[in-house]
Amino acid sequence: MIDLTGRTDVPVAEDVIRELAAHCRALHLDFLIVGAAARDLVIHARQQREPVRATEDIDIAVAVRVGDQFSQLARRMEKKHAEHKFEVLGVEVDVVPFGGLERERTIRFDDDHVLDVTGLLEADATAIPVTMPQGTVIRVASAPAQTALKVLAWRDRHLENPKDGLDLRLILAAMAEDPFVDEVWDDHEALDETDSDIFAAASYHYARLAAQPFTESDGSAVMDVLSDQRLRSLLIRDMRGELSPCLLDAYERGFAAGLGH
């Protein structure tokens, strides 16, 4: 549990979250926060730091069992220019369904847009509860799950926008800092595999955790990005920073180790 009760420095609109929670609760739908809002709640809020790259929109993933559930949820909100984009209290919200509607880890919307949702079932399985400043309790993608989702988001979007690469580096670098680094120092496997380089060890450690909810088949979606030399070079470029090759190398080895458990 992450308790942010009473905090005034959390850059995620709780009134929007509360409204989304009410819509989902009315339809008996479970949801979790993903994307930049998840990063801000799980990482930056715990470190009491301003986000390096601020965002005003909110992304949620909704566990649907039958097709009509997403349609019912959509009718409760003001739709924008895409099937899964809405406006809630003036804030843009991306709502991505996963679960029962998936076909080969993809979702097809009514407008025939197909979205790869690999990683959301896994993020849901490892989500952590967060109490917002005014008491709203929500489920949020954990830091390890966010890293895998960022790799896959970069794969899908880097030609249009490389921001997911930078986000990945920022998350991995944060994992080598308080309060996340303590468990890395206790991970002898990660330290041994990286010659006790704490930045690389943190990347290895959290990649291994990120991989564990995946089946080997589904986890290959992440590994395919990391092991493809062309994609790897582009991802390192988009991550920016001198540590990026080291972080990504450790991440690949840690993720492979997690899939093998």
Image: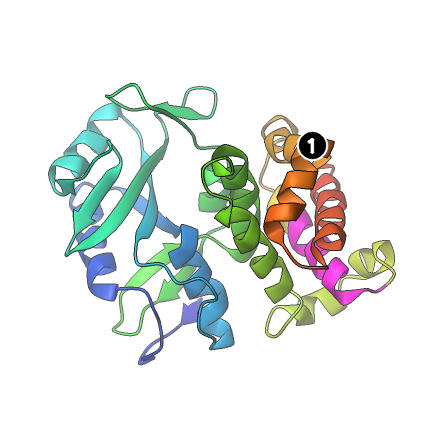
Residue at image x 66%, y 49%? 207
Is 74 magenta? The answer is: no
Q: Is residue 68 above or below residue 177?
A: above
Tell me how many marks there are.
Answer: 1
Q: Is residue 55 above or below residue 10?
A: above
Residue at image x 26%, y 42%? 29
Front in this rendered view, residue 246 or 237: 237
Q: Is residue 42 above or below residue 84?
A: below
Residue 78 percent coordinates (x, y): 12, 42
Residue that numbered label 1 is attached to: 230
Quadrant including the N terminus: bottom left
- Element type where label 1 sits in the image: helix
Residue 241 percent coordinates (x, y): 66, 59
Residue at image x 73%, y 63%? 199
Disc 1 packing (10 Å; few <14; some 14–19; many ≥20): few
Residue 58 percent coordinates (x, y): 31, 53
Does residue 228 show up? no
Q: How is the image coloured?
A: rainbow
Quadrant including the C terminus: top right
Residue 75 percent coordinates (x, y): 12, 36
Classify residue 146 as left or right of residue 241. Answer: left
User: Which amino acid, mark 1?
Assistant: Arg
Does residue 57 show up? yes
Residue at image x 61%, y 51%? 239
Q: Give the residues drawn in magenta, as a range.
A: 196-208
